[in-house]
Image (cartoon, rainbow, N blue to C red):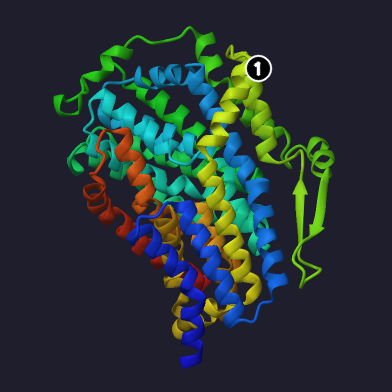
């Protein structure tokens, strides 16, 4: 047992380094991930006798997986968002959303929950906190409340954020079918999707009494998000689960709010900053143009998905399969060159920008600016993926799983979502958490005889709680709302929500593991 514990601690050193570097030393994520890569390499050679050639090729495979498809999706998603900002289309979208009501409870659902979920699905990387939070502050909601509402809203969509990249990455490294994994994830997160809008209404309305008159809207928002998410995950896959869910919730909540338009709103819930947008209706062409890049992406991803085999099959066949890791010729990596979300999104972003009046020169400049903007995120992904590949191929992941299983046995499912939350809290990224702990969950499930998909999906469930607490996310919200330096105050207030979610998630995963 002592030897097992010693190997567990040694295998955990890259994770421990990340915790110290990010939370204690406040190091930038790209530097911390580079350090984790070095720590993992040294530990793999000393503790698991990994050869330099195997270590180098494992890292190279991690770099390759990071660049394609992860980095290309990140750049594509943020590029499209930046194009919409450049053309002022985002201002039109904001105005449309804010024109429907002066009730801060309804507007919080529309802006933080629905629109924030849409931004997370399309772009991610802080946009779903920064943009909605700043919009709410401009309308008269207090900065602290705005940030807290957006942090709560941003948790549950993370697993399918940035066109599903956390889930597609998790499926890739564990070998589980992406559609099957996404469906289980969507089912697991459904109760929390329903609860989130209710909590947000109570938050902005200062207590449970705020639900009076707003509970139906909260239920409409939650159900119209959660149920389409399950359907999209099952039939379209993880790439559009968030986008479809948020679009349905946005339409349903917007229409529901229209039915209540004109009714007297209690003074305590009425916002004064909405008058700027009153009467905004269009013209309709302006609204369509503003949404055009996102509409194109939605249509293109649907047409190139497995729902349309005539398009999907020839495009997906344009691919290259290679073996990079030297010690296992069966360990292959497939690069799909055309039918990959990153390529499709960039093409749609360019077309959408041209439709909105951008010149080719402006689009090139936006793309270059986006690459510079995301450069540190790209370096972070390279470091994390290389670290994870070394940990996986060397046997470090197996040692972590063996310790947890040997210590907890059948109780392991209780900690499965906690690991996912820890990974996201430390790295600020759902994708990084999936990479770090995805194979731990898989090997633990195999060891205790649990349903593999259920336990691997539990990592993503935990990501939802960890994302609320993420220091990076909190810092983005504070910067957007003029509360720089107030991160500790926000962290203290959001902690109760995150811990409550984590406990409920642990109970749900354990209960599910008993019956599946």
Q: Position of residue 345 (x, y in %)?
A: 64, 32
Q: How many labels does the image show?
A: 1
Residue 216 appears in the picture as rendered: no
Residue 435 visible within the image: yes
Which element type, helix, strand or loop, lies under badge 1?
helix
The location of residue 406, given as percent across then percent down, is 49, 86
Choose between 240 and 235: the one closer to the eye: 240
Q: Please give left or right for residue 277 compared with residue 486 in the image.
A: right
Which quadrant, please, contains the C terminus? Answer: bottom right
Q: Residue at x 42, y 69 (%)?
A: 16
**What residue appears at the point 52 percent right and 22 percent down from the top-left corner?**
84
- Residue 331 placement (x, y as % from top left): 76, 66
Q: In this view, does 229 lie above or below 466?
A: above
Tell me: 195 left or right of 385: left
Outermost residue toward the top in this view: 283
Going 45% across and 61% down the picture, which residue do you hit? Answer: 423
Mark 1: few, some, or many residues within 10 Å (few <14, many ≥20)?
few
Q: Which residue is drawn at 49% across and 69% down?
A: 14
Which residue reaches farthest left?
A: 267
Which residue is identified by label 1? 360
Indicate the quadrant where residue 268 lies: top left
């Amino acid at each position: 047992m002592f030897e097992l514990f010693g190997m567990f601690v040694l295998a955990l050193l890259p994770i421990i380094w990340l915790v110290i570097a990010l939370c204690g030393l406040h190091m930038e994520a790209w530097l911390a991930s580079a350090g984790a890569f070095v720590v993992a390499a040294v530990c793999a050679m000393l503790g698991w006798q990994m050869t330099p050639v195997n270590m180098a090729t494992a890292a190279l495979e991690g770099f390759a997986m990071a660049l394609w498809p992860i980095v290309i999706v990140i750049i594509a998603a943020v590029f499209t968002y930046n194009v919409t900002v450049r053309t002022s289309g985002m201002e039109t979208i904001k105005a449309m959303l804010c024109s429907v009501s002066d009730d801060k409870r309804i507007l919080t659902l529309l802006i933080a929950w629905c629109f924030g979920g849409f931004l997370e699905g399309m772009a991610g990387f802080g946009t779903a906190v920064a943009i909605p939070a700043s919009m709410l502050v401009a309308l008269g909601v207090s900065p602290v409340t705005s940030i807290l509402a957006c942090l709560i809203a941003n948790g549950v969509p993370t697993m399918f954020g940035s066109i599903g990249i956390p889930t597609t990455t998790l499926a890739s490294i564990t070998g589980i079918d992406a559609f099957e994994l996404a469906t289980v994830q969507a089912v697991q997160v459904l109760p929390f999707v329903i609860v989130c809008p209710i909590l947000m209404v109570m938050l902005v309305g200062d207590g449970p009494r705020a639900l009076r008159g707003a509970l139906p809207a909260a239920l409409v928002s939650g159900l119209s998000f959660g149920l389409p998410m399950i359907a999209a995950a099952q039939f379209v896959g993880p790439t559009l689960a968030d986008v479809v869910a948020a679009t349905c919730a946005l339409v349903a909540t917007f229409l529901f709010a229209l039915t209540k338009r004109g009714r007297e709103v209690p003074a305590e819930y009425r916002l004064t900053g909405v008058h700027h947008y009153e009467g905004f209706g269009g013209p309709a062409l302006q609204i369509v143009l503003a949404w055009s890049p996102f509409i194109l992406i939605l249509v293109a991803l649907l047409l190139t998905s497995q729902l349309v085999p005539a398009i999907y099959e020839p495009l997906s066949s344009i691919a290259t399969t290679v073996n990079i890791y030297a010690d296992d010729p069966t360990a292959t990596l497939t690069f799909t060159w055309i039918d990959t979300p990153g390529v499709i999104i960039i093409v749609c972003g360019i077309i959408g920008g041209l439709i909105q009046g951008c010149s080719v020169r402006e689009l090139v400049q936006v793309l270059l600016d986006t690459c510079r903007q995301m450069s540190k995120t790209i370096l972070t992904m390279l470091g994390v993926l290389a670290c994870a590949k070394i940990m996986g191929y060397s046997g470090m992941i197996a040692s972590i799983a063996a310790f947890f299983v040997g210590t907890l046995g059948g109780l392991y499912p209780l900690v499965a979502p906690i690991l996912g939350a820890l990974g996201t809290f430390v790295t600020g990224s759902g994708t990084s958490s999936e990479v770090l702990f995805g194979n731990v969950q898989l090997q633990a499930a195999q060891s205790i005889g649990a349903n593999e998909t259920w336990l691997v999906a539990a990592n993503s469930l935990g990501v939802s709680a960890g994302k609320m607490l993420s220091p990076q996310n909190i810092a983005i919200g504070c910067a957007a709302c003029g509360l720089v330096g107030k991160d500790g105050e926000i962290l203290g207030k959001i902690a109760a929500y995150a811990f409550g979610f984590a406990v409920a998630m642990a109970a749900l995963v354990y209960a599910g593991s008993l019956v599946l």
